[in-house]
Image (tube, rainbow, N blue to C red):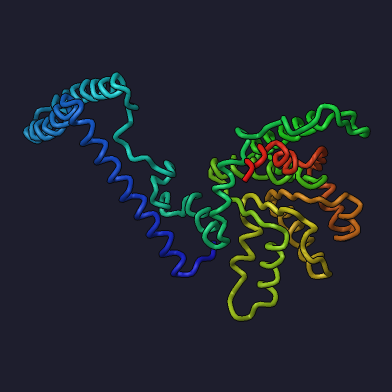
Amino acid sequence: MALSNTQYNILLRRYEAKQLENQHIVMERIQSVYQELPRLLEIDNTISSLSVAQAKKLIGGDDTALEELHRQLTELIHEKKLLLTSHGYPEHYFEPPYGCPDCQDTGYIDGQKCHCFQQAAIDLVYTQSNIRQILNIENFQNFSYDFYSVEQVNPATGMSSRDTVKHAVHQCLDFVKTFDQEFHNLFFYGDTGIGKTYLSNCVAKELLDSGHSVIYFSASSLFHIFEKNVFDRERDASGDYQNIFECDLLIIDDLGTELSNTFTVSQLFLCLNERILRRKSTIISTNLALLQLADLYSERTFSRISSNYTMIKLFGDDIRIQKKLKRPPCQGL
């Protein structure tokens, strides 16, 4: 991830702040529980004094000191955990509440940048922090089939709108489950407001939570990055550009809403083809019909998509309109 010194320092300060916050939380927990459970303080003091006493014995030549220390510590730790859990506390209540347990909120593992640091860099560079808030709402746990009709049927498949989206959710869950073992891409298409972006966000949430790097772009934002890389001579945009090819998952939302020209057509092909060659997964959503896609972006691009993507067509009534209609009317003035 290409970062300026300023951006890198911003991220380091965030990790330092998180570590200080963790320490503060742990100290508050310890003091609070000590007041409620004085025996817990006695146990911790005994553990400290035992370690010092047994160390002295070991230095003095007592070969049984280490074994005895281990036995006593095991008993005390067991009593400590039992005391905590019997009073409604988790047994690891005194451990810091790490945002990333893998690196323990340091940003690094064995001298290498942790996956959380890489995603934090992506969020900073592309100002995608608002995506996190969206994903807290738009995820598989909150997905509802109630907005999809059982009466509307696709004559080509014989499946209702609801059965179609259930099958789509199953495909998305399989995409997440096999993400590290198999190379997949997803292509959502269909009318406006039927859940294409929502499903993309569901997948993004699962992969972000499992430590993968995800970059989300509207089509217009993506092509803006491409333009900066080619035409912006005032700054080096190549770092931002390369991240598009290197992230674990790239999401291109609302393809077809950008101003299309020969530049966007060529850049889309380059992007999709390069990610296919690198076996990096991509999700595309669009309101375009497949014939429109071929006409707008060339047969060459359409061929790459049709042969390398799972094509998922959704249909039904606009969910946003349904939600508006279900809202209670404003009370009279």
Residue 282 appears anywhere in the view: yes
Report the quarter where the N terminus lies. bottom right
Residue plotted at (59% across, 67% down): 239
Q: Position of residue 319 (x, y in %)?
A: 74, 40
- Find residue 30 and report its horizontal and vertical position in percent: 23, 35
Q: Position of residue 10 (x, y in %)?
A: 42, 63
Left or right placement of residue 286 versus residue 98 in this view: right
Give the number of callouts: 0
On screen, residue 162 above or below 5: above
Farthest bottom residue? 234
The answer to whether residue 26 is left or right of residue 144 is left
In the current view of this chain or complex, which residue is farthest to the front? 333
Say which quarter of the image contains residue 151. top right
Q: Quadrant of residue 183?
A: top right
Q: Position of residue 259 (x, y in %)?
A: 79, 66
Q: Is residue 67 visible?
A: no
Seen in the picture, residue 146 relative to 275 is either above or below; the reply is above
Left or right? Give the position of 325 relative to 204.
right
Task: Work out whether residue 274 or residue 54 is closer to the camera in this orientation and state it.
Answer: 274
Instruction: Determine the residue positioned at 25% across, 21% down.
Output: 83
Taking 269 as reference, is 52 above or below it? above
Q: Is residue 215 above or below residue 141?
A: below
Q: Residue at x 74, y 50 (%)?
A: 284
The residue depicted at 58 percent of the width and 51 percent of the height is: 131
User: Which residue is more in the foreground, 241 or 216?
Assistant: 216
